[in-house]
Image (tube, rainbow, N blue to C red):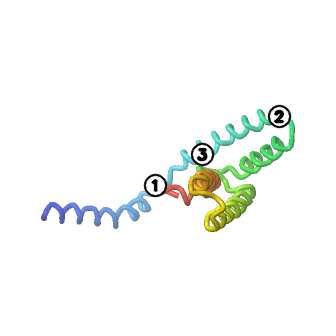
Amino acid sequence: MSAFTVVLGTLILQGFTIRPLIALLRIAPDSSLDEEVSQTRSAMLDAALKQLTAVQGGGAAALRAEYEAVRAGNAGRWQPDTEYDEVRRLAIAAERRLLADWRRGGRIQDDAYHLLEDELDRAELHVARVSSTTLDG
């Protein structure tokens, strides 16, 4: 019991003193990871855009516009949320409502429902805000 008390007391003491100690020592936050991710993401987006310049058609134009929007908002570790992401979330929500209605109405069987639900889950995860999918957001 005394070992538990010593450990708990040490953790509490350190917990209350670490923030003032950091402030006193003027330890600056490390932003190197954010900078590296941002620079690398920009290079990746540039490579994708370069590749897409050779592709013709409406789909390629839409994808180029989306990549350019991401590149314009790229700053730091977290991938920027673009207008395309918000529109996708609205569309996915409409698909999910229809899928649920059809299941309740008996228009589709469980196997089809679960397959399509999985597709929607994956699409939704792709456009989810990072803070909703990580512990350190």
Task: Please state which of residues 20 and 77 is positioned toward the viewer in this rendering.
Answer: 77
According to the picture, the residue beneath numbered tag 2 turns out to be 55
- Which kind of residue does numbered mark 1 sit on? Ile
Q: Nearer the viewer, mark 1 or mark 3?
A: 3
**Residue drawn at (33%, 64%) of the image:** 15
Residue 41's x, y, as percent? 65, 42
- Which kind of residue does numbered mark 2 sit on? Val
Query: Between disc 1 and disc 3, whose residue precedes?
Result: 1
Crowd tier of the residue under label 1, counting other residues whose Cα lies within 10 Å: few below 14, some 14–19, many 20 or above: few
Tell me, yes or no, whether the two marked residues, 1 and 3, touch with CB atoms within 8 Å. no
Tell me, yes or no, whether the two marked residues, 1 and 2, touch with CB atoms within 8 Å. no
Q: Would residue 78 be visible to someone looking at this image?
A: no
- Residue 27 badge: 1
Tell me the quarter of the image containing the N terminus: bottom left
Q: Kindly state the secondary structure of the residue where label 3 is placed.
A: helix
Query: Between disc 3 and disc 2, whose residue precedes?
Result: 3
Query: Between disc 1 and disc 2, whose residue precedes?
Result: 1
Q: CA distance from mark 1 to mark 3?
A: 18 Å
**Residue drawn at (53%, 58%) of the image:** 137
According to the picture, the residue beneath numbered tag 3 turns out to be 35
Crowd tier of the residue under label 3, counting other residues whose Cα lies within 10 Å: few below 14, some 14–19, many 20 or above: some
Q: Look at the picture and state if 119 lies above or below 45.
A: below
Q: CA distance from mark 3 to mark 2?
A: 31 Å
Residue 105's x, y, as percent? 64, 67
Q: Kindly state the secondary structure of the residue where label 1 is placed.
A: loop
Residue 74's x, y, as percent? 68, 49
**Residue drawn at (86%, 44%) of the image:** 58
Q: Kindly state the secondary structure of the residue where label 2 is placed.
A: loop
Q: CA distance from mark 1 to mark 2?
A: 49 Å
